[in-house]
Image (cartoon, rainbow, N blue to C red):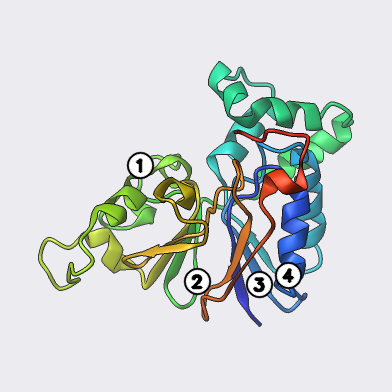
Amino acid sequence: MRTLVIGDIHGGLRALEQVLERASVSVEDHLIFLGDYVDGWSESAAVIDFLIALSLKQKTTLIRGNHDDLVQQWLEGRAMSPKWMQHGGQSTIDSYKSRSEREIDAHIAFYKTFKDYYIDSKNRMFCHAGFQNLNGPEHEWHCTVFYWDRTLWEMVCAMREDFNPKDLLYPKRLLLFSEIFIGHTPTTRIHKTTPVQMANVWNVDTGAAFKGRVSIMDVDSKEFWQSDPLPSLYPNEDGRN
């Protein structure tokens, strides 16, 4: 059984289906999704349908992303910030226009099953964005840090490559886990188009919300597969630009 981690999807169902096929995913594989299933391309509601069906036939771990939390709030009828509309919210609203109340209720129930983070038997942590508490994620005061934080990724990007974990000034939160897998901040921001490792942190968000791809990686071998760039799969759309 492989453990496969999947980066941000942002409504790109065609890309998700394509990358799962390219990775030859089977029912024996454990799939860990890092969140942000929605907001961006036109198939956000369909992505949730797909994940619901997938979770019924094989082992999946679904992590909550910041966009998933925003969409859940909207589905539950809460007032939304105009900023959400500017960052992919309208595409999600459009994808739900033909959905019945029963379908929406089923989706809300599914959103509520998402985890803030997951730690496997090999002490590898998986979350959407990061964590801040030096004593570990279980000590965080607010769960929103797991799907909104950028300090973890910014920190490892700023670290010297020769920074020794035995150094007294080495960031303590990096020592808590053998590896940490995240999404949230596209690797395209540092001009990379594939999953990137900094210290013991792996970023698997390869810019699917914009002009990048959906990526899936074997967490043991580090072999990875990618979809085509999202604009080529949705040629009549802009995504989140």
Question: Would residue 195 be seen by someone viewing this image from the given angle?
Answer: yes
Label 2 Cα neighbours within 10 Å, binned few <14 / some 14-19 / many ≥20: few
- From the viewer's perspective, is 30 left or right of 14? left
Label 3 Cα neighbours within 10 Å, binned few <14 / some 14-19 / many ≥20: some
Front-lying residue, 229 or 43: 229
Q: Nearer the viewer, mark 3 or mark 4?
A: 4
Q: Secondary structure at mark 4?
A: helix
Dots 3 and 1: beta carbons under 8 Å?
no
**In the drawing, what numbered circle is on residue 55?**
none
Residue 164 in picture, x, y percent from top left: 17, 71
Q: CA distance from mark 4 to mark 1?
A: 40 Å
- From the viewer's perspective, is 32 left or right of 188? right
**In the drawing, what numbered circle is on residue 30?**
3
Residue 130 in picture, x, y percent from top left: 40, 51
Residue to which mark 1 is pinned: 141
Q: Nearer the viewer, mark 2 or mark 4?
A: 4
First of labels 2, 4 by sequence position: 4
Q: Nearer the viewer, mark 4 or mark 1?
A: 4
Q: Say which quarter of the image contains residue 20.
A: bottom right
First of labels 3, 4 by sequence position: 4
Q: Secondary structure at mark 1?
A: loop
Q: Amino acid at mark 3?
A: His
Q: Secondary structure at mark 2?
A: loop
Question: Would residue 132 be seen by someone viewing this image from the given angle?
Answer: no
Residue 187 in picture, x, y percent from top left: 46, 52
Position of the N terminus, as image quadrant, is bottom right
